[in-house]
Image: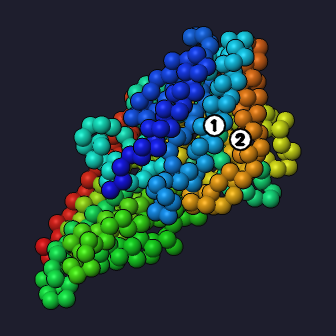
């Protein structure tokens, strides 16, 4: 089982000491390791520079974690913009309240451990931003800006106003019976065989998915036996069910449940499915997207900016965007594949400097006319949920389905 990385506490400590160095008193320990600080006057329209903190567990990197999603670049860029605003006292001059927030646990992984933390009441929700919403960080009206790195492509340097899939996540535990794998396998119930049949049954659903729903189902086996000479009595599968709309995700999720049950039924194994909410599909605020787009155009030739990018990945920024006007800038300058251990900043000018300049220009544009532009974005935004309604919707998506194994 993975332990929370020492590196994550180190990251929080570095961010806190950088903020203290510019004379601020950061809040730390948000959702365990998050860090926040703010500039400007209470009552002025607020802009949050939000950054993810976490790396991805990797089995091929020494230390076991790799910044394979570029979150290190996000933190650097958000902090650089925030520091520039602090050191020049620009927030007050612009008539803006500016918040820096680093949120942990964007990568929705290692569900068993997170569900244990939830059971032990150390957390309530499984992602950093969901916990920040619960803790009240998104109660007050505020504009949210975020940067995310992306892989290189010759025709696209940056994306603004991009949307993303939402998802639900499942952790399925197949319960079998151990027996000697050579001497008496007939006395066992093979949980791995049940899980592998379930995988095949999930794959067979794909032709039933509707193209425009953008469904992605990508299960992995996180446990498939303990010792080679015993019939595996436990196998664990984790999967996301992603899609462009919640209803489409729910429909695909019920097919996945059917497939999981089919595997268990065939072997007579037991099955326990833990359903967790995953993330909302991300739809950015178009007014804010126009301002971000203008700032990007001042820095990059607009032929190389995608203003309407559709990603099939997901991010808990989608949850934030249900409550507050939100946009995400994506920028290139990296080599390797995103979510692969070889992903690295190749050109610092592109990976760090240009996105920082674009976000800084965006904040300055929001402060035009003493914050009037920011105020306009905030007043024309209609949230999809109230904060309490959003939290209730998360609560409803936690459930456990249990099936008794006939052969047990
Ligand atoms: Zn990622
Ligand atoms: Zn990411």
Q: Residue 157, how many percent across, how many down? A: 77, 50
Nearer-the-camera pick, 310 or 1: 1
The residue identified by callout 1 is 76
Q: Is residue 308 visible?
A: no
Give percent across and percent down for residue 211. 59, 64
Using the numbered discs, state the Cα–Cα distance from disc 1 to disc 2 in whole angstroms.
Answer: 7 Å
Is label 2 in a helix, a strand or a loop?
helix
Classify residue 292 as left or right of residue 263. Answer: right
Is residue 84 placed above or below 358 in the rendered structure?
above
Mark 1: secondary structure: helix
User: In the figure, residue 357 lies in which quadrant?
Assistant: top right
Q: Quadrant of the N terminus?
A: bottom left
The residue at the point 17 percent across, 66 percent down is 404
Q: Residue at x 53, y 54 (%)?
A: 66
Q: Where does residue 46 sit, x and y in percent of width and height?
A: 60, 20
Badge count: 2
The numbered mark at residue 403 is none
Q: Is residue 343 visible?
A: yes
Judging by the rendered image, the residue that carries numbered circle 2 is 352
Q: How is the image coloured?
A: rainbow
Q: Is mark 1 within 8 Å of ligand 2?
A: no
Question: Image point 35% across, 70% down: which residue?
Answer: 259
Instruction: Pinpoint residue 181: horizontal percent, then vertical percent.
Output: 20, 84
Is residue 331 left or right of 204 when viewed as pictured? right
Location of residue 239 with respect to 198 vertically, above or below: above
The 10 Å Cα crowd at callout 1, few under 14, some 14 to 19, many 20 or more, is: some
Q: Quadrant of residue 251?
A: bottom left
Query: Is the C terminus in the top left, top right, bottom left or bottom right quadrant?
Result: bottom left
Residue sitting at x 46%, y 56%: 64
Contact, mark 1 vs mark 2 (Cβ under 8 Å): yes
């Amino acid at each position: 089982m993975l332990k929370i990385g020492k590196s994550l506490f180190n990251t929080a400590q570095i961010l806190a000491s950088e903020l203290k160095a510019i004379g601020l008193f950061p809040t730390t320990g948000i959702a365990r390791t998050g860090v926040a600080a703010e500039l400007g006057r209470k009552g002025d329209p607020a802009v949050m520079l939000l950054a993810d903190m976490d790396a991805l567990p990797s089995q091929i990197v020494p230390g076991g974690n790799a910044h394979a999603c570029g979150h290190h670049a996000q933190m650097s860029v958000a902090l650089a913009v925030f520091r520039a605003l602090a050191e020049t006292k620009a927030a007050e001059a612009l008539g803006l309240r500016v918040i820096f927030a680093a949120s942990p646990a964007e990568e929705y992984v290692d569900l068993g451990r997170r569900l244990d933390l939830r059971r032990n009441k150390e957390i309530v929700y499984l992602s950093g931003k969901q916990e920040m919403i619960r803790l009240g960080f998104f109660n007050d009206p505020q504009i949210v800006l975020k940067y995310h790195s992306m892989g290189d492509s010759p025709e696209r340097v940056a994306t603004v106003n991009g949307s993303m899939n939402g998802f639900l996540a499942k952790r399925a535990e197949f319960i079998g019976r151990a027996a000697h794998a050579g001497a008496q396998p007939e006395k066992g119930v093979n949980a791995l065989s049940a899980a592998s049949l379930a995988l095949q049954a999930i794959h067979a659903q794909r032709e039933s998915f509707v193209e425009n729903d953008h469904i992605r189902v990508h299960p992995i086996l996180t446990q498939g036996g303990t010792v080679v000479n015993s019939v595996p009595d436990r196998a664990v599968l984790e999967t996301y069910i992603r899609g462009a709309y919640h209803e489409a995700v729910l429909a695909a999720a019920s097919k996945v449940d059917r497939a999981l049950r089919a595997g268990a039924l065939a072997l007579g194994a037991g099955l326990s499915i833990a359903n967790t909410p995953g993330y909302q599909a991300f739809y950015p605020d178009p007014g804010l997207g126009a301002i971000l787009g203008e700032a990007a155009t001042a820095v990059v030739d607009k032929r190389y900016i995608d203003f309407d990018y559709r990603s099939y990945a997901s991010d808990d920024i989608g949850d934030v965007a249900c409550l507050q006007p939100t946009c995400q800038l994506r920028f290139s300058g990296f080599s390797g594949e995103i979510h692969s251990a070889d992903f690295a900043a190749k050109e610092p000018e592109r990976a760090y400097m240009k996105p920082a300049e674009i976000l800084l220009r965006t904040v300055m544009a929001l402060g035009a006319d003493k914050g009037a532009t920011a105020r306009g974005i905030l007043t024309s935004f209609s949230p999809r949920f109230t904060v309490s309604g959003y939290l209730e919707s998360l609560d409803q998506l936690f459930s456990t389905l249990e099936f008794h194994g006939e052969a047990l």
